[in-house]
Amino acid sequence: MTPQMLTFLVLAAVAVAGAVNVIVLRHPIHSAISLIVVMVSLAGLFLTLEAEFIAALQIIVYAGAIMVLFVFVIMLLNAGEEERTNMSRMARYVGVPLGIVLLGELAYQVGAASLSMTAQPADASAIHGLSMLLFQDFVFPFELTSILILIALLGALVLAQRREGAPAKREQQNAG
Amino acid sequence: MPISYYLALSAVLFGLGVIGFVFRRNIITIFMSIELMLNAVNLAFIAFARAWGQLQGQVFVFFVIVVAAAEAAVGLAIVIVISRNRHSLNVERINLLKL
């Protein structure tokens, strides 16, 4: 067994175990921590695929920013344990097997593709090529994402602000 | 090392995300299942980028991460509004549009 294979197997096992924990554990904060484990192990897998920039981005943006936002909201809403629902008989005897069949089928069909890694020039030009692509070929979508983030920022503000009472509006009327 | 191992792992993670999305009742956990699916797709993108020795796949993952950040911000704001209005995070209680 080659070292690459061993690294892959360990990281893949951690990722799958974390993903199972995300959907099995009943407390949202435990699910969030498990999801962070999945993301960190995926960052390790990105490193084995020679995508160093994306691995750093995965840690900083995903595991750092997005998951902190999740944990923040879980703490803010004081989300307790999920209440158990009486799962319908249909869901238990048809849904669960079908879900497992879907999982196995997807993994089998996709895994059957016979593609191997091509030899890539292993110099430090990956980040250079990535930035050339990002700021030349993809510069229009890149600028579009800044508008998208601006809209998301405004949308989150509008959605999350408190409407009842509206003291700000009253002050404006007094001033005007 | 064949790329299909990475693709199989990506498919398994995506399937687990789908199962979590369908079976869980807490709206925040459903959201986290969506993030899990996005991560699985990112892994497939990076694996294909490596298989063909091209960097476009990595650029696409960059955009996916950016859009996921925007989606998480708006989605969690919606979660806060729902929990403020319905006093519950259970999706079975959010049934205003149900007959």
Image (cartoon, coloured by chain):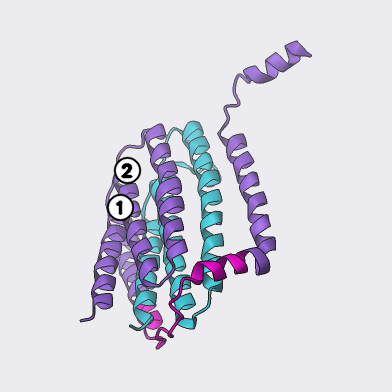
Dot placed on the residue nearer the N-terminal end, 1 or 2: 2
Is A70 placed left or right of B60 in the picture? left
Q: Nearer the viewer, residue A4 or B41?
A: A4
Q: Chain of mark 1?
A: A
The region drawn magenta spans A105-134
A53 magenta-colored: no
Residue topped by disc 2: A29
Say if residue A173 shows up in the picture. yes
Residue A167 position by quadrant:
top right
- Which secondary structure, mark 1? helix
Pointers 1 and 2 in contact (CB under 8 A)? Answer: no
Q: Colour of chain B?
A: cyan
Q: Which mark is residue A125?
A: none
Q: Residue at x 37, y 75 (%)?
A: B6
Q: For the view shown, which residue lies furthest in the top direction?
A: A174
Is A140 placed left or right of B32 in the picture? right
A125 magenta-colored: yes
Residue topped by disc 1: A34
